[in-house]
Image: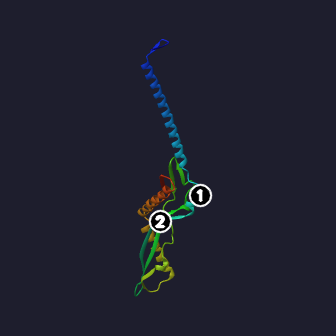
Amino acid sequence: MKIHGKKILTFGKMTCLIWSLTILVIAIAVVIFASKIKRDHIETELTETISPTPTLIKSMQDIGEWEFLSIADEEIVDTVRKGILSDDELVRIYYGTLRLGVNMHKATPNWLRMNNDTLMARLPKIELLDNNFIDEGRTQSFYESGSWTDRDRATLYLRAYRQMKRCCVTSVNIKTAELSCTEQFTKIFNALGYENVVITYEK
């Protein structure tokens, strides 16, 4: 038995104290080591999450038009001109392909940015990419009686144009193209190493 001041410590109690201090030191060391590893891990993650480079942003914008939905349509348009003895009639069939997608040339500044570990991409709204969607080479006169001018045919063309646009550029088709666009852009960004991606569109 050892006497230390006014405190009496037996060998057994002293051994327990030493072990307790040893365990405490080990526990503190583990906590410090774990926190260091955690800091290193966080720093590594932050280092790996790299903001999009100007080269990447420019290369995606330079592609210009990205098509995500193609709609083939045909419209039959007719006109009748009343006559004294008989009526003249012109019926024509128009074929067209309307393509919906995004035009990256219309992307706003900072359309691609990082928000913590999430890549935020704000794309131009889905729109009709080409206004010249009627294939005039395939246009046919289904029925024609009487004499018709180029101006008459141009009027029919405009009617077919409006009908195609009204039938194909609908909210349903725009939403379909938007879903396809979101899926494709997300896959592209995932392949580039961005795990969390949020795609939105200009109104």
Residue 1: image quadrant is: top left
Alpha-carbon distance for marks 1 and 2?
Answer: 26 Å
Q: Nearer the viewer, mark 1 or mark 2?
A: 1
Residue 64 lies, in percent from the top left, at 55, 64
Residue 203: tell me if it is visible. no
Q: How is the image coloured?
A: rainbow
| Residue drawn at point x = 53 percent, y = 41 percent | 40
Q: Residue 100, which numbered label?
A: 2
| Residue most extreme to the right | 54
- Mark 1 residue type: Thr
- Placement of 174 over or under 73, stated as above or below: above
x, y percent for residue 169: 44, 66
Task: Sort mark 2 into few (<14), some (14-19) or many (20+) by Cα contacts within 10 Å.
Answer: many
* Residue labelled with disc 1: 55
Q: Position of residue 158 (x, y in %)?
A: 48, 74
The correct choice, above or below, for 42 with respect to 94 in the image is above
Disc 1 or 2, which lies upstream in sequence? Answer: 1
The front one of 153 and 125 is 125
| Picture coordinates of residue 104, whole percent (x, y) | 54, 61
Residue found 51% across the figure and 80% down from its top: 151
Q: Secondary structure at mark 1?
A: helix
What is the crowding at mark 1: few (fewer than 14 residues within 10 Å), some, or many (at least 20)? few
Q: What residue is rendered at 41% in x and 62% in y?
A: 172
Vertical placement of 62 versus 132: above or below? Answer: above
Front position in the image: 105 or 13? 13
Q: Which residue sits furthest bottom?
A: 85
What amino acid is found at the position of numbered circle 2 in the picture?
Leu
| Residue 151 visible to the viewer | yes
Marker disc for residue 63: none
Q: Secondary structure at mark 2?
A: strand
